[in-house]
Every structure is written in C-alpha cells, then in structure tokens.
Image (tube, grey):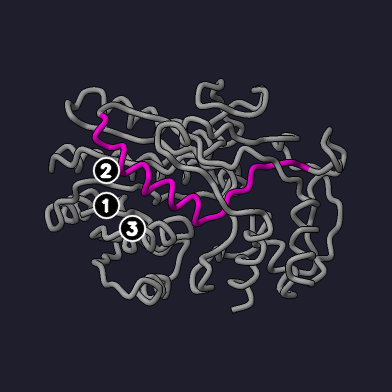
C-alpha cells in the first residue's frame, strides 16, 4: 500500500494514475486547498480502478496517525504542500508553517508505524542561482524565496530523520518545470486565480480566460532574450516516481533531478504552442520578476543511470496535451 499525500493535485493525480496502472494499491489523502474533489473521480475514470481516499489535512497529527493506523502503508509519496513562489514571498509564515509542519507530522507517523520509505516532492528552487548550467544534484544549494526554503528545509528534516532510523530510505526528487496534462484530457493543471506558471497562463490566454500573456523580461542573455527553463511533461514526471519506488530498497537518502536536460525559452514555448494548436497567444513584454534568473535546466544523468528513467515527451506533446485539457 502506497500513501499518496496531495494526490488530488496536479502532480499527485498523474502519479496516482500511473501507480494504479502499474498495479499498486494506493490510498490518497488531500485537503483540496489547491485541488478539486472531481479529480478523485477522474482518476478512477481514467484507470477503471478504485482506491481509498480520505479528505484530511496533514497539519492535524492525530488525523495523520489515523491514516497510518488504518492502512499501514509500506511507502509514502509526499506531494502535499503550498507551492506558489510569488505567494510564498507575500505570506512566508503560511508556507513555513504548512510545508514544514505537515512533513514533520508525516515523518512522526512513519516512525510510529514503522513505514520506512518516503519519496519527497522537492524542487529545483533549492539550487543557488549562482550555479553554472546544467544543474547536477551536487550543485550548490541556496534559495531565493520562502517556497524554495521550505523544500530545502524539508529535505534536511527528512535526511536527518532517515539517518537515525535504521532500515529507512528516502528519495528526494527535485523537479524542474512540469507542464502538460494526461492524454485523456480528464486531469491537468488547474490553478486557482491568475496562474503562476507559464503553461496554464498560455492555455488560459489562448482560451480567452486571460486577456494576454505577460512575458517577464525580454533582455536576458538567452537566444531570444526571454527566460529559459527545463520543461518536463507531467506524465514523464509521474513515471519518475514509479521508477523511484524501485530504488527504495536502498537505505539512506538519495537525490535525483527530474528534468529533460534541455532548455526552452518562454517565446519558444509560446511559438510551439501556436504551431501545434493553430491558436494565437497574445502577449506583452513585462518587467523581470525579482529573483528570476536567465537560464535553468537539469543534468538528469543520475536518474537515467540509477533509476533507468528518461523524460521522453517533446515540447510539442506538452503543448498539445495542455491544450486538450484546457479545451475540455
């Protein structure tokens, strides 16, 4: 039994689908703070399989313990957490309190019920902006926003906990930029309010839900002046978690980047979307956002060599699947 926290969210729901398709038994928990109950039904519809679901908040240590008492999970995949970089700058205490407290509650329950394996949803935001590209797992760490610091701190808390619990193991997965949606169009990224990430902003602008896309900075030292990022298809990212489960017999803490190893600029992504869909995306050039860097992309070699995992889908497939989801 695999416990999937935040399993109704964007990344969690796609991973839940893949786990079910691979034959795993799962229990999903979510408090719907940034997701919707309909996603749970969509996971069942895509897979044709049922699974246990509990609406709960990991900030409640007693409720967290009850999940472990009821299901006795062998492993945990921990997605639950607040995740908007800009919002974290505005309300830092909410991010520190939620993301760190929920992780501690989870680890305490794991110790109590002898659940020895955890895969943690981390982020490339833990890397210092001063690093050369591409980023390896051994690059210098250091964050530019509270969201990133919560991931950094949770990584350290997990590693320290694993170190003092014999036979326990952790895999820390540092994501780059997840985009796209499940090919069924039944689940995808659905942020509340104005999107913080590029792809939902592109698709909502194409659909007329937003007036125009804001491109933050066009004077970076890049191919076209706009920021370059490592975009990874959400189903490739989900596959990385399934691959990590196969590595959990190795005790201790292990870190892997999940990215393509290729950088795509904002305007390159916009033009790829327009080419694939035939829909124009009106945009304006806006000021740079504080803390943004020109270029960020992964060296995914360790995940390939150790986990046997490689990101396979193209930017064009990311755009097509994201538009299918938005259109539905």
> Mark 2: few, some, or many residues within 10 Å (few <14, many ≥20)?
some
- Could you tell me which quadrant the N terminus lies in? bottom left
Q: Earlier in the sequence, mark 2 or mark 1?
A: 1
Q: CA distance from mark 3 to mark 2?
A: 24 Å
Say which of 266 and 108 sits in front: 266
Q: Quick check: 130 left or right of 165?
A: right
Residue 99 x, y percent position in the rendering:
41, 43
Q: CA distance from mark 1 to mark 3?
A: 26 Å
Which residue is label 1 attached to?
Answer: 60
When the figure is inspected, residue 212 is found, relative to residue 237, above or below; the finding is below
Q: Is residue 19 magenta?
A: no
Q: Residue at x 50, y 26 (%)?
A: 137
When the figure is inspected, residue 37 is found, relative to residue 160, above or below; the finding is below
What is the magenta range?
227-250
Which residue is label 2 attached to?
Answer: 105
Q: Residue at x 42, y 62 (%)?
A: 13
Say which of marks 2 and 1 sits in front. 2
């Amino acid at each position: 039994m695999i416990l999937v926290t935040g399993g109704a969210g964007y990344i969690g729901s796609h991973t839940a689908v893949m786990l079910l398709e691979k034959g795993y038994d799962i229990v999903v928990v979510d408090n719907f703070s940034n997701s919707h109950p309909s996603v749970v039904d969509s996971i069942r519809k895509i897979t044709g399989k049922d699974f246990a679901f509990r609406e709960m908040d990991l900030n409640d240590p007693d409720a967290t313990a009850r999940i472990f008492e009821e299901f006795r999970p062998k492993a945990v995949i921990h997605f639950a957490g607040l995740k908007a970089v800009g919002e974290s700058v505005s309300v830092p205490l909410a991010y520190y309190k939620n993301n760190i407290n929920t992780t501690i509650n989870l680890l305490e329950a794991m110790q109590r019920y002898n659940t020895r394996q955890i895969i943690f949803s981390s982020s490339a935001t833990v890397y210092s902006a001063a690093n050369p590209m591409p980023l390896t797992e051994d690059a210098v760490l250091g964050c530019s926003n509270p969201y990133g610091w919560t991931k950094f701190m949770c990584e350290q808390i997990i590693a320290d906990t694993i170190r003092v619990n014999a036979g326990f193991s952790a895999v820390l997965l540092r994501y780059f930029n997840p985009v796209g949606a499940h090919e069924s169009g039944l689940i995808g990224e659905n942020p509340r309010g104005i999107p913080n990430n590029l792809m939902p902003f592109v698709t909502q602008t194409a659909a007329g839900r937003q007036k125009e896309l804001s491109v933050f900075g066009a004077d970076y030292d890049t191919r076209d002046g706009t920021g370059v990022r490592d975009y990874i298809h959400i189903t490739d990212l989900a596959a990385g978690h399934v691959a990590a489960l196969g590595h959990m017999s190795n005790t201790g803490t292990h870190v892997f980047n999940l990215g393509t190893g290729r950088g795509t600029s904002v305007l390159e992504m916009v033009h790829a979307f327009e080419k694939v869909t035939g829909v124009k995306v009106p945009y304006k050039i806006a000021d740079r956002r504080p803390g943004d860097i020109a270029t960020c992309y992964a060296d995914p070699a360790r995940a390939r060599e150790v986990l046997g995992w490689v990101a396979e889908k193209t930017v064009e497939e990311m755009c097509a699947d994201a538009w299918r989801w938005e259109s539905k």
